[in-house]
Image (cartoon, grey):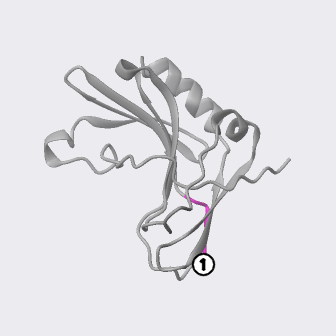
Amino acid sequence: MRKNFNLAPLAALALAALTPPSANAQATTVEGTFGTWSLYENATGESKLCFVAATPSEKKPPTANRGPALLYVSAWPKDGIRSEVSVKLGYPVKPDSTEELKLVEALKKGSKADVTATSARGTETTDTYTLSGLTQALTELGKQCK
């Protein structure tokens, strides 16, 4: 069963845990890989951030000038956040094009997610993410990030 989801960026969250400043570089660890998804943990002092992330299995158009793209689900136990879905598109989005949806349960049931957006320059892009391993990665996220 193939389900596609049209997602836009859901938060202005910087992916600091993937590209941390040098002071935090040792704090981020890969805790496991589940299909196409990896579980990361970043603990500094009393603060803890965990997330599962995947890169697109396909990007359209392949010639679009953009930075790295990423779909991720984050948890901040101290703040009571258990599963915040975010998309890093690799470019600024067209103003007023953001859509917010409750996605985690729908993503768990799907096999692929297509993220379609339009850049500020007018280029429409589509990134396809394989959802294989997401449910297991989210289960581990819930266990490890408390």
Nearest the viewer among 109 and 124 is 124
Helix, strand or loop at label 1? It is loop
Q: Which residue matches tag 1?
A: 61
Q: Residue at x 61, y 61 (%)?
A: 57
Question: From the viewer's perspective, is 131 left or right of 72?
Answer: right
Classed neighbour count for the residue bearing mark 1: other residues with Cα under 10 Å, few (<14), some (14–19), many (≥20): few
Q: Residue at x 60, y 52 (%)?
A: 99
Q: Is residue 17 above or below residue 50?
A: below
- In the rendered image, the quadrant that contains the C terminus is top left
Can residue 57 be found in the magenta stretch? yes
Which residue is more in the foreground, 123 or 21? 123
Q: Quadrant of residue 8?
A: bottom right
Q: Which residues are magenta?
A: 56-61
Residue 64: percent from left, percent from top: 51, 80
Residue 39, image x, y percentages? 47, 36
Answer with the quarter of the image where residue 129 lies: bottom right
Q: Is residue 17 left or right of residue 44?
A: right
Q: Give the residue at the far left of this rendering.
A: 23
Name the residue nearer the viewer: 114 or 80: 80
